[in-house]
Amino acid sequence: MRIAIIGAGAMGGLLGFYLADQVDLILVDPWMEHVDAINRTGLICEHDGSIEVRTPRAVTDPALAAPADLALVLVKAAQTPWAARACQAVLAADGIAYTLQNGLGHREILAELLGERRTGQGVTALGATLLGPGHIRHAGMGPTLLGADPDPGRAALLCDLLNRGGLPASVSHSIESLVWGKLLVNVGINALTALLRLPNGAVATNPTVRALAAAAVTEAATIAQAHGVQLPYHDAVAHMVAVAEATATNRSSMLQDLLRGAPTEIAAINGAIVREGALLELPTPINTTLSRLIEALETTTDQRI
Ligand code: NAD
């Protein structure tokens, strides 16, 4: 059994680190310096004050990782079309790609090239940070859930490998609910913390920020309901605030992306709510405004005063 990780940044690197000793594993990443560092000195992972090195093989050319039985897609949203082409090059004829990315729309992009029956979806509550080429930090532990669709057997096998590597993972029969459940948290926290340059905790403690985040989440919860999605909690705003409190000192991924001038995942998060709203003919003024503000920030970096 061979697994290829497509996008071996913070999260792809983390999963690769824990799977490296369990299975024939190859990391596929377009960042040459990162790939060279992994092949030269190994993948370094910091966790709770300890440092460990493992030595998965890494390549920049997806064709060199073929034929893989499973591909785990962990690029940022803007790179998903590249990841779909990489999966096509990497996977065996019956190979399956699983996306564990945040937001909506990734599975559909993969399915356009690979077909519905060769794409699956999951969510992870793990946290990871990329510290530099070949160097990651395991920042948070939490379960990884893989959708039973399209191949429950292979999803179970992957969960077993993750468990043996030390990461909690299980197969879920309600993955759409979990994907939307995580999406709504990101809808509330990511764009606002990025726009305001605040740690996550401010979403819970500052009344104005909290009210804005609650409005964005309420709007998204209406869209989820109209879409027929049953969220994995009763009160979407309370859940989002609880996550902001539990991760109070964290910088959201969108804030980190903006600070380093990288494209954000806004189109897959608040932008996805706007797109779904348009399809359902429901208004999404808050998420539209948040999306446009982030897009404006992304495209004016060199004009900033
Ligand atoms: P990441 O930015 O660490 O890596 C994504 C890609 O960007 C990789 O191909 C990486 O090599 C490349 N990259 C990163 N820094 C670079 C640099 N300086 N120069 C050139 N290339 C660079 O992204 P991530 O945090 O691993 O996120 C991947 C997906 O997983 C996203 O959809 C994210 O939302 C999701 N996710 C992340 C976490 C987390 O804690 N990191 C948790 C859950 C879900």
Image: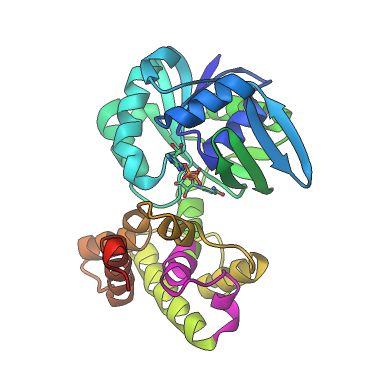
Residue furthest to the front = 305
Quadrant for the C terminus in the image: bottom left
State whether residue 150 appears in this view. Answer: no
State whether residue 79 appears in this view. Answer: yes
According to the image, what is the colour scheme of the structure? rainbow
User: Which residue is drawn at the image coordinates 21% and 60% (left, top)?
Assistant: 279
Query: Camera-side residue: 262 or 236?
Result: 262
Residue furthest to the bottom = 207
Number of numbered discs: 0
User: Within the image, what quadrant is residue 276 found in?
Assistant: bottom left
Query: Does the stretch in magenta take in 1?
Result: no
User: Within the image, what quadrant is residue 117 found in?
Assistant: top left
State left or right for residue 47 relative to residue 244: right
- Residue 179 % position (x, y): 47, 51
Q: Is residue 173 above or below residue 250?
A: above
Quadrant for the N terminus in the image: top right
- Residue 79 % position (x, y): 34, 40
- Residue 282 % position (x, y): 25, 71
State left or right for residue 200 relative to residue 62: right
Query: Camera-side residue: 216 or 229?
Result: 216
- Residue 163 % position (x, y): 70, 32
Q: Is residue 16 above or below residue 286?
A: above
Residues in magenta, as a range: 186-206
User: Which residue is drawn at the image coordinates 48% and 81% (left, top)?
Assistant: 209
Q: Is residue 169 above or below residue 88?
A: below
In terms of secondary structure, what is the magenta stretch mainly?
Answer: helix
Query: Does the stretch in magenta take in 195?
Result: yes
State left or right for residue 302 relative to residue 16: left
